[in-house]
Image (spheres, rainbow, N blue to C red):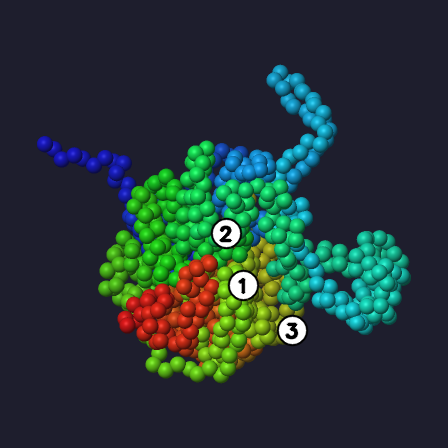
Amino acid sequence: MAAPTEHPADTHDLIRVEGARENNLRDVSVDLPKRRLTVFTGVSGSGKSSLVFATIAAESRRLIDETYPTFLQGFMASLPRPDVDSLSGITTAILVDQERLGANVRSTVGTVTDANAMLRHLFSRISDPYVGPPPAFSFNVPTAKASGVMSTEKAGGGTEKKVVREQVYLGGMCPECEGRGTVSDLDLSVIVDDSLSLNDGAILVPGYKADGWMVKAFAESGFVDGDKPIKDYTETERHDLLFRDKGKVKALGMNMTYQGLIPKLRESMFSKDPESLQPHVRRFVERAAVFAPCPACEGTRLNASARSAKVAGRSIAEVCQMQITDAAQWVRSIDDDAVAPLTGGLGRLLDSFTEIGLGYLSLDRPSGTLSGGEAQRVKMIRHLGSALTDVTYVFDEPTIGLHPHDIARMNNLLVDLRDKGNTVLVVEHKPEAIAIADHVVDLGPGAGTDGGTICFEGTVEGLRASDTLTGRHLDDRARTKDTVRQPTGTLEIRGAHQNNLKDVDVDVPTGVLTVVTGVAGSGKSSLVHGNLAGREGVVVVDQGAIKGSRRSNPATYTGMLEPIRKAFAKANDVKPALFSANSEGACPTCKGNGRIYTELGFMETVETPCEDCGGKRFQAAVLEYTLGGKNIAEVLDLSVAQAHDFFSAGESKIPAVRTVLGHLRDVGLGYIRLGQPLNTLSGGERQRLKLAMHMGDKGGTYLLDEPTTGLHLADVANLLALLDRLVDAGKTVVVIEHHQAVMAHADHLIDIGPGAGHDGGTVVFEGTPAALVAGRSTLTGEHLADYVGA
């Protein structure tokens, strides 16, 4: 009997990439097995994301977009084809990245996961009393009344008209806060000093100087007395100064529009995106704007009608405020056959939060407050129960923000996705996550121009035996210190009760390296950011995103470009504006972009180097001017390490620039170019760029939030050396961290727990890492002991 021949459809078991050149990739060709878990490793900036996201996932999305009708494509973003010779065998790619969820004030954990939609249907069916259909429980839908003529189109072209009076359309939105849950007010003590007159500087707003025309306009408007202290104003004068509506007045010898200070500030400052404001104005806005829970709805966003309806003794607002693990128990307590499919689906959804380590959240948590790791796991929830198979799931460091105890749970989820018949591609640094790979692709050998090639392909055991940077460091294990630094004092925290903290009293030692640990959701960030941030001399380096366009680069972000431009101007006796690609020196053809972007309607946007400037972004005349033998385009093309040498000696010596470049080199960014667009930097690179920016600050205490995010195993040692240098220079360093190497290196550990959410919020250990390892009294202690081999 002849052996059965393989069906042709079963032979397509590889994703084949040939000649990939996105970003720093150098003609990379690789075969990836389908329906297997492949982990991509390598130092930050080696090309992992360029291969996985910018090549494979980008082409999958582009091809899917091309299946839509041309009319629809005209309304969609047009995606360029990745710079690759050939891609075959790719399947539908689902990206689960680190991008934070939108910070829309109406977006919550419940709305982004559809849990709120299911709850609204549940309450509209069986709540007591009955208050209306699902929109009656939505904080995004206002209750509206309408009167007038209602017209309805009928078959045959006729129209039926009906007069309605006081027709009510039910919604659940709180009318006071319009469904936001908070009301904003302005702290007048930050805006006006009541003890002074206008002419003596009573207005404390940036730009409103006592001798400036804006303050003089108030003083000479005829409504107020510029020489009288504000506290002595009558009610009318105070109203006219602060709240008067727009109107024409004669002041400063001309007809001008007069408006009260508060509405004027709301228009000019408080209605704008804080990130778009100048730093000193942004700091003022953050001090003056006060947000408090809405007194009408008590922060629930819902009106009284929606809050009055109960199911199993709870209103929808109470359910959304509960910890998700408790909300899941509440759902299971509902015994009603009429809604059994609904409660079953809702229960499975809430259980998914617990499976993925997010059971400590609540459904009313604003989505913009989630960390990058939490946002990524929230996105995973919608895929856990999916019936789709033979798709490609792409993850970007899914273990970010996870305690070692939670990483095993994440590994199980990745394996489950693979076992359903899916291809799973993971960009990862943690050895615990690399260990579960069926296939490993190691990129490098270095970062930036020193990376972009495949150093190893094969199994985890093969990687461990290889001589690549990742292979050599895969089994790295730190050990606890024999002796630790002695503190010089303490930062006291008393009665901390933010979020889930339970009146915590703890002393954070100064002059040493303190690491705050605990499972995700235990209360680490609440303790550190809620009680230490904002104190005098405290510098916070958090995980907030850096906004980066193709026009912004490390030179502009760090402020280096300003002294560089001035040095070029002084050396050549011309204006500094000539050396800005966003100002007078810009190439007029590409307007300083260096590339021409041609929109072709529903087809791909074509991107080509500017023929006039050759992609250098500057006018030819500007490139004639040099500093130290290099023109401005050549300087911006230097790497940080090369630029550090260039600005250290000779005609081009600029101490201020050299200092910033030294900080960038210290955080491991010596390979990035000064003019490299910020939107080409990886997440880890942007995090370290922000850290370098703060290294020159004069604060005595540094708060770092998971600085190992995006760091390769080999770079963790460099980070520890950097933290040591900060402490040895007399700084106090407090780090929120899950990486065991950082824990072991600490002088002092504060472990929060024992669990997450309401199961956490207490200090379960204080002391040295060696004492925690010896005691094994907490989850952190057990994992750290295993890590150091104790």
Among numbered discs 1 and 3, the one appearing first in the sequence: 1
Mark 2 is surrounded, within 10 Å at the Cα level, by few (under 14), some (14 to 19) or many (20 or more) other residues, namely some
The residues tagged by marks 1 and 3 sit, at their Cα atoms, a distance apart of 57 Å
Which residue is labeled 2 in the image? 322
Q: Position of residue 757 (x, y in %)?
A: 46, 58
* Screen quadrant of the N terminus: top left
**Could you tell me which residue is drawn at 82 percent across and 61 percent down?**
238
* Screen quadrant of the C terminus: bottom left
Among numbered discs 1 and 2, the one appearing first in the sequence: 2
- Residue type highlighted by circle 3: Asp
* Residue 763 occupies quadrant: bottom left
Q: Position of residue 426 (x, y in %)?
A: 36, 54
| Horizontal arrangement in the rendering, residue 707 relative to residue 741 (left or right) | right
Q: Position of residue 346 (x, y in %)?
A: 45, 42
Q: Mark 3: which secondary structure?
A: loop
The residues tagged by marks 2 and 3 sit, at their Cα atoms, a distance apart of 66 Å
In front of the other: 297 or 732: 297
The residues tagged by marks 1 and 2 sit, at their Cα atoms, a distance apart of 16 Å
**Could you tell me which residue is drawn at 50 percent across and 38 percent down?**
122
- Residue type highlighted by circle 2: Met
Mark 1 vs mark 3: in front:
1
- Residue type highlighted by circle 1: Gln
Mark 2 vs mark 3: in front:
2
**Could you tell me which residue is drawn at 59 percent across and 75 percent down?**
536
**Residue 158 visible, this orientation:** yes
Query: Is residue 781 depicted above or below 249 in this figure?
Result: below
Answer yes or no: do the residues labelled 1 and 3 have beta carbons within 8 Å? no
Which residue is labeled 1 in the image? 498
Q: Mark 1: which secondary structure?
A: loop
Seen from this angle, which residue lies furthest left?
A: 1
**Residue 99 visible, this orientation:** no
Q: Position of residue 658 (x, y in %)?
A: 52, 76
